[in-house]
Amino acid sequence: MQVLFNIPGPLREFTGNQSAVRVEVEAGANLLQVLQALFVVYPGLRHRVLAETGETRRHVNIFVANENVRYTGGLATAIPAGAEVSIVPAISGG
Amino acid sequence: MIGQTLDHYRVLAQIGEGGMGVVYRARDEVLNRDVALKLLAHGALEKVSSGHLLREAQTASSLSHPNICTIHQVGKTGNDFYVVMELIEGRSLCDLITAMGLSMEIVTRYGTQIADALAHAHDRGIVHRDLKGSNVMVTPEGRVKVLDFGLATRLDRDEISQLTLSYTSLESKLVGTLPYMAPEVLRGQKGDHLSDLWSLGVLLYEAAAGKLPFRGNTGFEVTSAILREPPPALPSTVPYGLAAVIQRCLIKERADRYQRASEVREALEAVQGAVLQSRHPSEKTRGPRTLVLRGMEHLSVKNGDVLLLVGTNKGAFFLRSSRDRSRWDVAGPYFHGQGIYAMAYDGRSDRHRLWVSANNVMWGAFLRSSDDFGRIWTNPLEASIRFPTESGASLRNIWQICLGRNDEPEKLYCGVEPAALFESGDEGESWSMVHGLYDHPHRPRWMPSNGGLILHTILPDPCNKDRMYVAVSAGGVYRTEDRGTTWQARNNGVRVMFLPEKYPEFGQCVHKIVLHESRPERLFLQNHWGLYRSDNRGDSWQDIARGVPSDFGFAMLMHPHNADCVYIVPVESDEFRCTPEGQLRVYRTRNAGGSWEALDRGLPQKGAYETILRDAMSSDSLDPAGIYFGTRSGTVYGSRDEGKSWKKIVERLPQILCVKAAVVHMDGAPTAKPNLKSKIPKRRKTARTKRVRRGTSG
């Protein structure tokens, strides 16, 4: 199945300036699996989205459709076919 | 048979023998082409009516697909039933699979073609029933051709039970088939498109791993494994996606298997894309290895210039001046919006390299470097400084970049949060954590200070390559005498205000330590409350806070040429953390802490509530030395007379986190650092863009 990723501006230098990229994964994959498929194609995203521990960075939010995955099972969130996944920087700073 | 003619096919040579019969190369005398002619064994005909076999073969001959061996004709001559097929030059897949398996790219490429062939046949109601490596040919061009669609004999229950009980004594035609048979077929059900997908899973497993998933010495063992055992784990070299496809083909419960060959094909295509791209990621998708900053003014740096690197919480600023240090060009901000906690200028070994620790609150902390004073920066795809997975830690920030000794120009060190030391022996290309310190039994009891649990100071002993000091907030000073293998707490005499025990072995909130290369046994320490000196490499410390308005402070600087001279900027208290009485004053000792003098000429002495952070003070290496510091309110002050008088160099910057000064040497010019061995640079790296000139004031 295909998953569409929305890429935030600061990370587009690692996706050839594309704001959205499609990745093929097997049906039934969860968020971690589709992210890993994304990182195979766009390796510059890996350490900017996930920390060494494999968790999402503290100030990065990931949405599947309009749902923040923090409330739907985190990286184990199931990804339906044709899903749109958005990587979004959190509102923070100083 | 050789030399005989069947219909208009003249048999030329035998090219194979399989379960279904013998295969010959034959000449089609009508169309003048070579074909494969399979003469079916009499046994095959005994099981089913020749009419039925003929119908199946005729149906199979209707298949036209690039990955299916084309059947030209089926016929019977006398008692001989024969099939005329496309002659395929190539090797069978079972001959190609070695004990190491095939490459993942090949497995997915062949697998996709086989799945596509199955999808085509299944859509037309044709099931293979005997898919295995010997029935798949690979042409020299790499095209897969599946043979013998619809020609497999259907085994009855008796045959299966015979197969199970007497594996080794079976006819060769069945021995090769058993390991590929689906559980439901072994239970006596008729093979269908789902059992073809199982066989495809076995074939893919074999191709990826180099061995069959269900093995045994007897038919019983093999059958038992197929019916009851899960397939053994695939080697770790098999990518997750491919392993998942294979596993799903090999689900014993038919309903949970892939339901269509086209699904397998699509899954393999996705894996194939990922495998290919991971092997050959294009520059477009990888992103640039370097980032070229255009549209901004960069410094134009000449030989002998003084360079000031100013890190703020919103980016880096670079300043340059000629040796007179009266006017400064300013460039920046670089790394717009990111916190620049550490910088270094590496002029060793003919380099002119800027190092920056850029911390993006969203995307993490990355080391960046530039060899042309800021035009082009490395842009690492992966974070070069990473905690090992087994540590369970993740990098929060890089607080210190420390050059190795002058005679170790490939060496670099970084101090990070959570507190750990990293080292590089290849100019910063790759980094590894120093386990000796991270595994120290004290570490779990270190406490985070206001800024976090950070390793902020690294002091290699300039004369002894085995010895190094680090300082941790709040853990204290640690020293190694064996290049980092073991570390000892060195805090004897350093007072702790925030613990019941005032002189513990460790746990001090040390803010900075410094030493001079001419007297490496003597250290100075600015503590969270307290100023100290050690004359014995940190074994013991004595209080030297005499004549300072406060012994609380962050920054501490060693004079570049005078081992008795140290600079500090006292702040009022840990609650207030601003310069006392609204007066911005640098304090200096010139007798190793015997006394301190205020240096305030040119600095605001009214309403100046400033904070100078631990890495925000630096000196150049000229004589007289230039001393520089930056405030949290965004002003950089400089003195070109060793602190006697100060001038404002730049103001209204974001909060200043670090300041580093250096003198740039190019084209064989004499080095100003007295002990630096003279090196002859090979290349000129001066930049040629318009300058931004800002006059100094004050």
Image (spheres, rainbow, N blue to C red):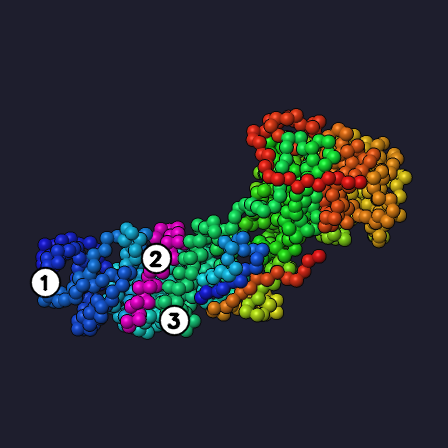
Query: Where is residue B300 shown, x and y percent of the image?
Result: 62, 37
**Disc 3 designates what residue?**
B259
User: The residue marked by circle 3 belongs to what chain?
Assistant: B
Number of residues whose C-alpha sits closer than 10 Å to that of mark 2, classed few (under 14), some (14–19) or many (20 or more): many
The CA distance from mark 2 to mark 3 is 20 Å
Q: Is residue B252 magenta?
A: no
Q: Amino acid at mark 2?
A: Tyr
The CA distance from mark 2 to mark 1 is 35 Å
Work out whether mark 2 precedes mark 3 in sequence or the reverse, and give the earlier one: 2
User: The residue marked by circle 1 belongs to what chain?
Assistant: B
User: Does label 3 lie on the same chain as label 2?
Assistant: yes
Q: Secondary structure at mark 1?
A: loop
Query: Where is residue B681 shown, x and y percent of the image?
Result: 59, 29
Q: Secondary structure at mark 2?
A: helix
* Dominant SS type (magenta): helix
**Disc 1 designates what residue?**
B7
Work out whether mark 1 precedes mark 3 in sequence or the reverse, and give the earlier one: 1
Q: In the rendered structure, which segment of residues is drawn in magenta?
A: B97-125
**Disc 2 designates what residue?**
B110
Q: Which residue reaches farthest right?
A: B547
Q: Secondary structure at mark 3?
A: loop
The CA distance from mark 1 to mark 3 is 42 Å
Residue B664: image quadrant is top right
Residue sitting nearer the eye, B492 or B532 = B532
Query: Where is residue B214 shown, x and y percent of the image?
Result: 39, 61
Q: Amino acid at mark 3?
A: Gln
